[in-house]
């Protein structure tokens, strides 16, 4: 038998077994034979070829066989390959094609124990070997069976597929006799399998059909199936991990290391090390004992480190599997963990360090040396430091691996093998050693080399090392001497090197004196009295410190004798903070404060001044008290609360400094801001709490608001009131609440608003029919709503049926379409609750109950009055009538109709922004993120309480949650909710969700079921969004009347800002791209740049696809920082990708232009953060601070020795004692308490005892060696005092001095524990202190970040047209100025389906036939199209993405011809394209297929698919796949495009995407070609692009019903993703006639009109025969 072998993935024992099988089942031959590795037909290297290198020397090749005929033979085998089908992979050891069947063989070389089966797992002795190999192989049978389906009819045996058997062959000596019957029947020993050469034995086992014994004539079919050009080699698998990429080879090929991926989840990776002991010289490495000793060495060192320094152990790559001596062989595999986001030294230096500032490089070196200082303190030396053993992350975390050659004091080294096993050999980097060189000095030398390369951002290479010493000698930096001394073996260990490094580091001196330059921006070279002379009349106020007067009708406040020259630090900072507050108020211009025209420091007259509007009118105290004054009270509350959100209190609020406009019911606060030279605050006792000196200015304001409000309403302060009991009661509560009184106005506002718990009822009287009297029926709202359904009346076309459902019953009314009111109703029906069907079908919700009476005098006037004033009811009726009219047209129109309706029936509805936002608030709880399962729930091997949920959501459903949230997975069925488990966020990624702590029902979830996610922290993520929107609606955002800028009917004009941008400013942003092309802001971008700076406070930029939005934002932000002095900018977007791209580009501008920039990138998952931002990822910054604190703790403490009058060495040892020894003693005490605690589980007790024993043993030795004190388990509580006493005695420290040292060390320990526990909220600090704060719209709304409590000079929101209102609100609420960047012609806001449905019902626009996006404009569109937007908006209208013919079509069809195409070089890689896509734009028309061109449902009715379009696209792709030169050209172009896939297939429907993915996976195209293709839905494609785009329209039916394709947005997105070629696949007949004015109708007409005149640009091809 000939066996074709794929090189790479087979281990030695598998090769040996396959050789034996091949030899045994050969036809009689003249010569012996061995497995012949098949020659590659392609010259290209196969994947996994590197693995074959380790096998090449194991077995010699032998001559080919000379066959002699045998009755059963020939057979043929295929070994070591991998098959893929529908995304499922199968690794095949061996497939044998016999004369009558196919046998799949799984090889297991298990030894020295009994094999048993428990459930779905096999065990070798007590070792869990994972999922049953029988079950694994059974799945491979199914996979292979599906692969053979495409060859049906081709087999000689009447076209019937051969039967597939599967066997697990045990090649070792393990006893498998105890397996269960269902497992044993598919398991046999190799020796028994070899007996099947006997035909009788073969027939007895397999019982073949006589007609099947011709399969060996069909070998050509299997050769085609197992074509090695398309079938990749098997990969090495160890303990559930599969090798993916070779990442390191030992110089002597002793071992190789691979990045391996878990078979369970692609997110879980490990380091797979594959040994080849044939490459190790000496007899010891040839024995199992010797091999076991070598492999065990690293684990012994790691175990020792773990017991001596757990924190250091956590920074090592630790073993994931235990070694069993009997399993060790010549070719042995082991697994080590891979730390997330860590890469090896050289890769990290090349990828990240070049972008680090010098300070960050120094931090990294500090952390690197400190790790080895800790290692050397444990008496371990690594001795093989280098690129292979140091792993770094962007957070500057250091991890260590490869301790194979390590020295540690108890056990020494691996002796003779060290030089062989070490990657660096006997000495690293050419180090010269002598008899006195210690292992620790070898490490120090390596550290010095690595430190220099980090600081200089250079990778370590032989070429670089050749000149390294000369470069080091010539340097004279502060760190140079430390590195030189390390290279010359001047330090005994890394501890000494670290101390020297920290001592040499320049100390930052803190200057506490005030810098007068801080005032430069506020200085005005004027004499105030000349610049602002007083009008005729007296001063309004005149004191020795202050003058207030009128000048030209404006109010001038002047504080006298304010000199900033040599002012005290206290006055300087007070004055600066005051000026900053005034600048903030001037910028924001709240409507409740006088407008500030000018302010600053008049240097010629030494005066601080403010010039503002002079407000006249009655004061608060002049208004007659009355209950009718409640609107003024609300306005006062609104004003003060908004002022407080700006972090500015009034502080001296009273009736005389609040001016009232009675007619407009508005208030103005005066006497703010105010300043006192002596630093005191202006207060008044009457309107302040009794503890006036012990409360804050904010509390004084709240007190004043409550008292002034009570007085204006006619209440006596602090006295009970029968008329306004709620208000008087809450005042008493505030006065008596010592802890929380007057902290906020919430309780007072609740009292003013009164109770809304009572249900409102509308009374309706209906006439009894046929004298059928009924009793009064009350219909209660369910969760605050009655459900309204609207239907056509079969009896009268003038009427509509309006059904109203609630708790208690339902009632039917008849609505007159002409009189527009309900005319009469029918007898109500009593029902206990609301049926889910009625709730689901309802079109509208009403917020009250109905009380239905029976009388011969009917009266429904009250209900009609209410419905008339409800815009949502009018919308619901109007939409229903429009849909009826549209459907009537469809039914009346013959298929051949060519007339166009011209005017679309379905139009956007009129709705105020306030109304829209209020309804979004009401439905916010419906916006739980959710997924639709793409497959059944998958079990997790070895974890019965976990499942994997695969999904294909367009966006990460978990991005809205904080990493510490407990996220529940909830299944909803009607009103019922069931929690199925808790999300394991760490193990979840963009395509799968991992649940643990599951209910059994989670295991039975089916494809297409929906699951929702929420936190246990009371919907924290959503309350932030809701709170932000409420804040804006209440005019409490930083821009107080922000909602008005989004009202389509607003006539507001923008504010003008005097900002000038010069051409030289723009020239700074000229740069070259990777290809040497000049990138510069074009004229449109420059015009927009100036326009957006000059008008505000809300600015709007429309950026169609490819117009350079990212480049624009990067330049804009840089300009704000460098030229406008913006100190705080918030940059957010709807997607992580957009945030990463924009923030990354900004950082590059700042780095190139030497502009300092502090950035923080917020996200709950590091995987969402791009590599270029991982160093500023919020958690990475925290980790960096913690690591530096640990590294520098001893140095920090000992540096205080002089000021404390203590010995430096004593302080250093004291710190070590507290942090390393006493902390571990406290851990031991904690173990003891847990062991003794009642209720601790026995298994837990055993584990705790083991940990206690290990830690106690190592700590005992350490204390004995360091202090000569015996540690005893029964006296742990007193050991800390004993050790402190010993240390004090050694240094003769007095008790008073010792107390200071203990306090200092305890503070260090507490700080360290806080940093480790995550209790410290650094995120809030970063959000407040960083210049550029970035994240997604929802991500930055997490509770702990505190965006709402901050203000930003600018808030910039990219992809604004895609964000829903509450997402925008999170960021907008905090902006002094706002820039919205988006394109309302692209994808609409991304509501979840349940949220969209709930919102549509609140608005009265719900329908199964019309998407909410067609009816409600995005907030961006509302603002951009308004009067305000036309003045404050700008457009970018030069696009560089699409080739001109595509760009022109998109421009004319979607942008009124405004979009023009700029120059872009088009790669010459399309010479061999099929005729179907020769033109730049092609419509592949499926009309000729007739009814076969129509779509079909997916079976569940939720989506549609089109089989004909799938087949046409596969045919088109096959045309490309067959041209090797074309595939190669596209692959090369992909590399030039930095991995961007060249071919994108965009589907308008999700089911079409699924079918295309399955179909592509089934093709026998090369893996290279398949890797060039992306298939996705249009909703996931905004912001992305491909060289070639194939758009599958999918929708086509005989009624020409367009569905959501009537909306232009998604069509625009689908077309505008194409760069060089666009192919539209669809039925043209669908878009003619009545649909010709719809978006796709216009596109088809555009191509049709130009295809003859411009055949190279536009083409229309019959898809049936192209």
Image: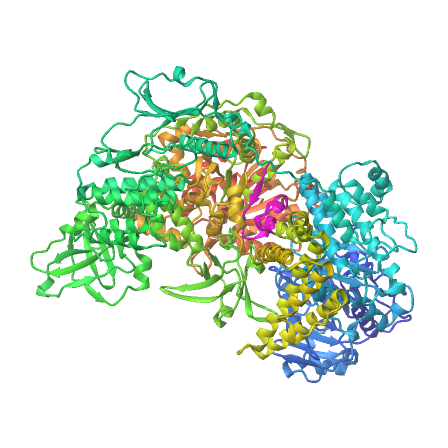
Inspect the magenta stretch and tell me whether residue 363 lies in it: no
Closer to the camera in the image, 689 or 997: 689
User: Residue 624: percent from the left, percent from the top?
Assistant: 17, 38
User: Residue 1090: percent from the left, percent from the top?
Assistant: 49, 25
Q: Outermost residue toward the bottom?
A: 178
User: Residue 131: percent from the left, percent from the top?
Assistant: 64, 72
| The C terminus lies in quadrant | top right
Closer to the camera in the image, 1448 or 495: 495
Q: Which residues are magenta?
A: 1157-1182
Q: Is residue 163 visible?
A: no
| Rendered residue at 72%/42% (across/down) | 505
- 512 vs 1252: above or below: above
What colouring method underlies this structural image? rainbow
Say whether residue 491 is left or right of residue 1110: right
Q: Is residue 1422 visible?
A: yes
Closer to the camera in the image, 1473 or 868: 868
The picture quadrant where one finds residue 112 is: bottom right
- 132 vs 610: above or below: below
Inspect the magenta stretch and tell me whether residue 1158 lies in it: yes
Q: How many numbered tags mark residues here?
A: 0
- 1352 vs 851: above or below: above
The picture quadrant where one finds residue 1268 is: bottom right
User: Residue 339: percent from the left, percent from the top?
Assistant: 67, 57
- 1015 vs 538: above or below: below
| The N terminus lies in quadrant | bottom right
Say whether residue 336 is left or right of residue 68: left
Say whether residue 442 is left or right of residue 766: right
């Amino acid at each position: 038998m000939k066996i074709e072998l794929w090189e790479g993935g087979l281990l030695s024992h598998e090769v040996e077994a396959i050789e034996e099988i091949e030899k045994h089942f050969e036809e009689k031959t003249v010569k012996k034979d061995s497995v012949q590795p098949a020659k590659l037909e392609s010259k290209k290297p196969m994947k996994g070829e590197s693995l074959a290198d380790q096998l090449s020397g194991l077995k010699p090749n032998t001559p080919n066989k000379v066959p002699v005929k045998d009755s059963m033979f020939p057979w043929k085998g295929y070994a070591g390959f991998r098959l893929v089908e529908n995304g499922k992979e199968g690794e095949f050891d061996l497939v044998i094609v016999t004369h009558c069947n196919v046998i799949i063989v799984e090889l297991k070389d298990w030894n020295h124990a009994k094999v048993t089966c428990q459930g779905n797992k096999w065990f070798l002795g007590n070792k869990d070997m994972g999922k049953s190999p029988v079950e694994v192989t059974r799945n491979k049978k199914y996979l292979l069976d599906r692969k053979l389906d495409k060859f049906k009819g081709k087999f000689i045996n009447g076209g019937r597929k051969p039967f597939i058997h599967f066997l697990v062959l045990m090649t070792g000596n393990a006893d498998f006799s105890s397996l269960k019957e269902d497992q044993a029947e598919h398991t046999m020993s190799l020796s028994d399998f070899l007996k099947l050469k006997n035909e009788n034995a073969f027939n007895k086992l397999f019982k073949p059909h006589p007609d099947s014994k011709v399969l060996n004539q069909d070998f050509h079919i299997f050769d085609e199936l197992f074509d090695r050009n398309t079938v990749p080699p098997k990969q090495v698998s160890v303990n559930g991990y599969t090798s993916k990429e070779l990442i390191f080879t030992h110089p002597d090929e002793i071992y190789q290391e691979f990045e391996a991926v878990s078979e369970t989840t692609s997110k879980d990776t490990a380091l797979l090390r594959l040994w080849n002991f044939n490459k190790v010289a000496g007899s010891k490495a040839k024995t199992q004992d010797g091999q076991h000793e070598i492999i065990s060495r690293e684990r012994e060192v790691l175990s020792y480190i773990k017991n001596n320094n757990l924190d250091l152990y956590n920074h090592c790559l630790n073993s994931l599997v235990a070694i069993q001596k009997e399993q060790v062989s010549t070719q042995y595999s082991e697994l080590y963990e891979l730390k997330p986001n860590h890469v090896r030294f050289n890769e990290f230096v090349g990828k990240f360090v070049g972008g680090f500032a010098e300070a960050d490089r120094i931090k990294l070196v500090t952390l690197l040396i400190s790790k080895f200082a800790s290692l050397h303190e444990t008496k371990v030396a690594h001795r093989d430091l280098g690129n292979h053993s140091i792993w770094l992350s962007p957070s500057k975390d250091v991890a260590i691996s490869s301790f194979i050659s390590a020295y540690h004091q108890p056990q020494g080294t691996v002796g003779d093998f060290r030089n062989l096993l070490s990657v660096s050999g006997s000495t690293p980097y050419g180090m010269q050693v002598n008899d006195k060189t210690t292992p620790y000095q070898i490490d120090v030398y390596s550290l010095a080399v690595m430190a220099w390369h980090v600081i200089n951002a250079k990778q370590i290479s032989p070429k670089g090392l050749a000149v390294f010493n000369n470069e080091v000698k010539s340097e004279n930096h502060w760190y140079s001497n430390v590195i030189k001394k390390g290279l010359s073996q001047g330090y005994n260990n890394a501890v000494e090197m670290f101390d020297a490094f920290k001592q040499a580091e320049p100390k930052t001196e803190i200057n506490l004196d005030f810098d007068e330059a801080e005032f430069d921006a506020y200085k005005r070279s004027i004499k105030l009295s000349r610049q602002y002379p007083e009008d005729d009349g007296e001063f309004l106020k005149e004191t020795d410190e202050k003058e207030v007067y009128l000048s030209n009708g404006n109010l001038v406040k002047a504080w006298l004798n304010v000199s900033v020259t040599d002012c005290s630090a206290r006055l300087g900072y007070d004055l600066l903070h005051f000026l900053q507050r005034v600048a903030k108020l001037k910028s924001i211009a709240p409507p409740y404060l006088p407008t500030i025209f000018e302010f600053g420091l008049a240097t010629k007259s030494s005066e601080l001044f403010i010039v503002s509007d002079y407000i006249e009118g009655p004061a608060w105290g002049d208004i007659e008290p009355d209950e009718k004054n409640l609107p003024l009270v609300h306005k006062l509350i609104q004003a003060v609360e908004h002022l407080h959100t700006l972090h500015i209190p009034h502080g001296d609020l009273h009736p005389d400094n609040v001016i009232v406009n009675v007619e407009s019911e508005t208030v103005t606060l005066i006497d703010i801001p105010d300043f006192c030279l002596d630093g005191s605050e202006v207060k008044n006792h009457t309107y302040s709490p009794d503890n006036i000196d012990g409360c804050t200015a904010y509390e004084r304001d709240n007190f004043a608001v409550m008292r002034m409000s009570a007085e204006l309403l006619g209440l006596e302060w602090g006295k009970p009131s029968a008329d306004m009991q709620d208000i008087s009661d809450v005042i008493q509560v505030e006065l008596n609440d010592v802890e929380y009184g007057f902290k906020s106005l919430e309780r007072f506002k609740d009292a003013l608003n009164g109770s809304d718990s009572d249900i409102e009822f509308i009374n309706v009287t209906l006439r009894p029919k046929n004298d059928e009297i009924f009793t009064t029926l009350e219909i209660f709202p369910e969760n605050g709503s009655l459900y309204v359904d609207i239907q056509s009346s079969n009896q009268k076309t003038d009427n509509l049926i309006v059904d109203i459902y609630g708790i208690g019953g339902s009632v039917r009314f008849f609505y007159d379409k002409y009189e527009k009111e309900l005319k009469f109703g029918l007898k109500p029906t009593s029902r206990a609750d609301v049926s889910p069907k009625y709730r689901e079908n309802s079109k509208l919700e009403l917020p009250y109950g109905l009380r239905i009476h029976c009388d011969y005098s009917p009266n429904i006037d009250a209900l009609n009055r209410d419905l008339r004033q409800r815009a949502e009811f009018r919308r619901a009726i109007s939409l229903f009538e429009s849909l009826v009219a549209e459907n009537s047209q469809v039914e009346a129109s013959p298929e051949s109709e060519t007339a166009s309706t011209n005017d679309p029936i379905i139009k956007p509805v009129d709705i105020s922004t306030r109304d829209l936002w209020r309804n979004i608030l009401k439905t916010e709880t419906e916006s739980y993120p959710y997924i639709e399962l793409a497959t059944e729930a998958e079990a997790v091997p070895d974890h019965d309480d976990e499942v994997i949920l695969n999904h294909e959501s367009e966006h990460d459903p978990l991005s809205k949650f904080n990493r510490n949230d407990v996220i529940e997975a909830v299944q909803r069925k009607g009103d019922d909710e069931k929690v199925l488990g808790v999300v394991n966020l760490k193990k979840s990624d963009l395509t799968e969700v991992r649940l643990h702590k599951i209910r059994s029902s989670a295991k039975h979830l089916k494809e297409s079921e929906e699951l929702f996610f929420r936190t246990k922290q009371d919907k924290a993520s959503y309350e932030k969004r809701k709170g932000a929107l409420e804040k804006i609606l209440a005019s409490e955002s930083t821009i107080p009347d922000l909602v008005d800028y989004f009202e389509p009917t607003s006539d507001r004009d923008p504010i003008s800002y005097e900002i000038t941008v010069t051409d030289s400013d723009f020239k700074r942003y000229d740069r070259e791209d990777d290809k040497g092309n000049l990138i510069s802001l074009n004229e449109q971008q420059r015009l927009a740049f100036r326009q957006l700076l000059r008008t505000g406070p809300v600015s709007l930029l429309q950026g169609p696809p490819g117009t350079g939005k990212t480049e624009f934002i990067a330049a804009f932000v840089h300009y704000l920082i460098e030229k406008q002095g913006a100190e705080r900018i918030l940059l957010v977007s709807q997607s992580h990708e957009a945030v990463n791209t924009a923030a990354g580009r900004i950082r590059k501008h700042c780095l190139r232009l030497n502009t300092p920039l502090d950035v923080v990138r917020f996200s709950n998952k590091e995987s969402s953060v791009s590599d270029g931002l991982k160093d500023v990822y919020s958690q990475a910054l925290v980790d960096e601070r913690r690591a530096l604190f640990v590294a520098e703790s001893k140095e920090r403490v000992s540096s205080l020795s002089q000021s404390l009058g203590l010995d430096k060495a004593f302080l250093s040892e004291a710190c070590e004692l507290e942090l390393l020894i006493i902390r571990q003693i406290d851990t031991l005490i904690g173990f003891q308490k847990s062991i003794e605690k009642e209720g601790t589980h026995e298994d837990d007790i055993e584990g705790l005892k083991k940990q206690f024993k290990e830690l106690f043993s190592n700590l005992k030795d350490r204390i004995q060696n360091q202090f000569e004190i015996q540690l005893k388990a029964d006296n742990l509580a007193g050991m800390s005092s004993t050790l402190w006493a010993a240390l004090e005695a050694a240094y003769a420290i007095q008790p008073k001095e010792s107390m200071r040292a203990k306090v200092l060390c305890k503070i260090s320990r507490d700080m360290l524990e806080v940093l480790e526990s995550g209790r410290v909220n650094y995120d809030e600090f970063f959000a407040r202190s960083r210049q550029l704060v970035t994240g997604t719209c929802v991500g930055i709304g997490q509770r702990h970040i505190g965006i709402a409590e901050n203000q930003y000079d600018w808030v910039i929101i990219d992809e604004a047209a895609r964000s829903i209102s509450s997402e925008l609100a999170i960021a907008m609420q905090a902006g002094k100025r706002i820039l919205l960047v988006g394109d309302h012609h692209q994808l609409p806001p991304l509501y979840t389906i349940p949220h969209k449905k709930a919102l549509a019902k609140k608005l009265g626009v719900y329908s199964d036939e019309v998407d909410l996006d067609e009816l409600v404009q995005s907030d961006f569109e509302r603002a951009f199209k308004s009067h305000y937007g036309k003045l404050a908006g700008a457009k970018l209208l030069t696009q560089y993405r699409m080739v001109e013919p595509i760009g022109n079509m998109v421009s004319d069809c979607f942008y009124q011809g405004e979009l023009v195409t700029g120059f872009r070089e088009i790669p010459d890689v399309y010479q061999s394209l099929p005729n179907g896509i020769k033109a730049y734009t092609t419509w592949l028309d499926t009309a000729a297929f007739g009814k076969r061109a129509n779509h079909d449902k997916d079976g569940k009715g939720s989506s549609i698919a089109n089989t004909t379009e799938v087949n046409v696209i596969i045919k088109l792709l096959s045309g490309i796949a067959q041209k090797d030169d074309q595939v190669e050209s596209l692959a090369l172009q992909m590399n030039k495009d930095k991995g961007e896939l060249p071919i994108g297939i965009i589907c308008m429907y999700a089911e079409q995407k699924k079918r295309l993915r399955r179909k592509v996976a089934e093709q026998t195209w090369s893996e290279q070609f398949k890797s060039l293709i992306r298939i996705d839905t249009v909703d996931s494609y905004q912001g992305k692009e491909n060289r070639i785009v194939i758009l599958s329209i999918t929708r086509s039916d005989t009624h020409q019903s367009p569905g959501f394709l009537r909306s232009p947005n998604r069509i625009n997105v689908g077309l505008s993703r194409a760069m060089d070629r666009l192919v539209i696949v669809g039925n043209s007949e669908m878009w003619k006639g009545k649909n010709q004015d719809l978006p796709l109708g216009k596109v088809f007409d555009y191509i049709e009109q130009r295809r003859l005149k411009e055949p190279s640009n536009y083409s229309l091809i019959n898809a049936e025969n192209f």
